[in-house]
Image (spheres, grey):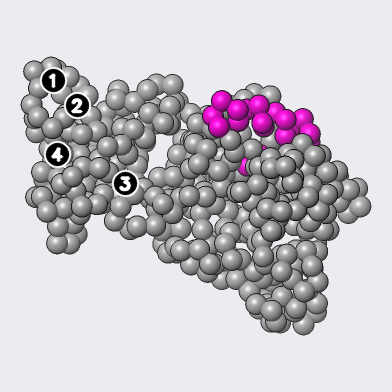
Amino acid sequence: MNYLALGEQLEKEKYVFCKYRVVTDLPLEKAANEIAAEQSTGTWTATTTLTEDIFKKLGAKVTSIEKVGDGEGLIEVAYPNEDLCRVGDIPQILSVIAGNLFGLEELKSVRLEDVIFSKEIVSWFKGPKFGIEGVRKLLKHPQGKPFIGTIVKPKIGLSPKDTAKYVYEAGLGGLTNSKDDETLVDQKFCPLEERVRLIAEAIDKVKDETGHRMLHATNVSTRADKIVEVAERAIKAGANQLMVDVITTSYAGIQALAEEKSFKVPIHVHRTTHAALTRNPKHGISMTVIAKLSRLAGGDGLHVGTFGVGKMHGKPEKDKEAQHALIDDWYKIKPVIPVCSGGMHPRLVEPLIKIAGPDIQIQAGGGVSGHPMGVRGGAAAMVQAVDAALQGISVEEYAKTHKELELAIKKW
């Protein structure tokens, strides 16, 4: 059957629209037809079981085709809302919009660039409990100022006591956030409950001594049937924020934590492994799609990149697209904190804020722990760099009266 519906007026609220970048030797119309068929009601040959009624009701529709190069095109496919589970099931949604199409033999490559969900589909999800404004309220952090965080370094190897000491020093330096790295969860050298308990004590000590509030994201990434249990253990031990590695753990893992009514802490979402999906510009799934799904699932913050100023591969315009997927108005779903990490240090703060604005979380690991004055000095230098940027003062000028920043810009 022919899935092409070019120029047909569809009721937008009844469909999910997906944009794919395709490279193929096929005519683009045939390639588009192959995708729509594979992801909805079709198969490789005509069947006696596919009726006209099923096809009209549940078949995907190709709504636009744009040639952008030799054998390359942008194809939009609309999937009926009825093709998706009404329970707000992201794994099932992905099986429809990003399923077998990646393995179609006649497509050299295909990339899901964007997805537009109808209001009905979005209404199936609760989204973040906190979002940007909720986290600001928790920390009593002023509007117009980025959250400033660190990642405990080295990634693995520190004892619970040394991890807590790191967090304490970072808090005294003025950071609002710290987090476990993506590879640390509950290893023997740093057991979860002991680590969380000591970090909670360190955060309380910072508040008692300075009045400064701080969140630490405890990594609870694990198998699907255990994640709520692990999170319960962490919260019982004193965790005031949870962290999930979304690609390795799943969107369903985030959703299970976000929708657990007894959990009153925000969720920090790490994107480790994302580049396996996002790095190839002509194949895979874009970070924009990952951002939208993470927001639906209930993440309160998500790593989006450093807009071209840090160490990780990425382009400013693509990071900007992912940022907008997190912060733009989206019916009742709260905006999510775009987290910028990967090679960050004080010299990069001003250009980052200039590109991304102040409603971000700037996260530095080595850029804090590698400071000549240690973690506290590195944290202070990051805070000073943010203050300088917000006041429109160069880091070189601001460093003349701030020793920590002076040493940081000499090193980096």
Q: Is mark 4 on a helix, strand or loop?
A: helix
Q: Is mark 1 on a helix, strand or loop?
A: loop
Marked residue nearer the N-terminal end (1 or 3): 1
- The three-letter code of the residue at mark 4 reads Asn
- Magenta segment boundaries in residue numbering: 223-243
Q: Name the residue under label 2.
A: 41
Q: How far apart are marks 2 and 1 (CA)?
A: 7 Å
Q: Name the residue under label 4.
A: 33
Q: Name the residue under label 3.
A: 112
The stretch drawn in magenta includes residue 228: yes
Percent of width and height locating residue 45:
9, 29
Task: State if disc 1 and disc 2 touch (CB < 8 Å).
Answer: yes
Q: Which mark is residue 178?
A: none
Marked residue nearer the N-terminal end (3 or 4): 4
- The three-letter code of the residue at mark 1 reads Leu
Question: For the C terminus, which image quadrant?
Answer: bottom right
Q: Residue at x 64, y 69 (%)?
A: 345
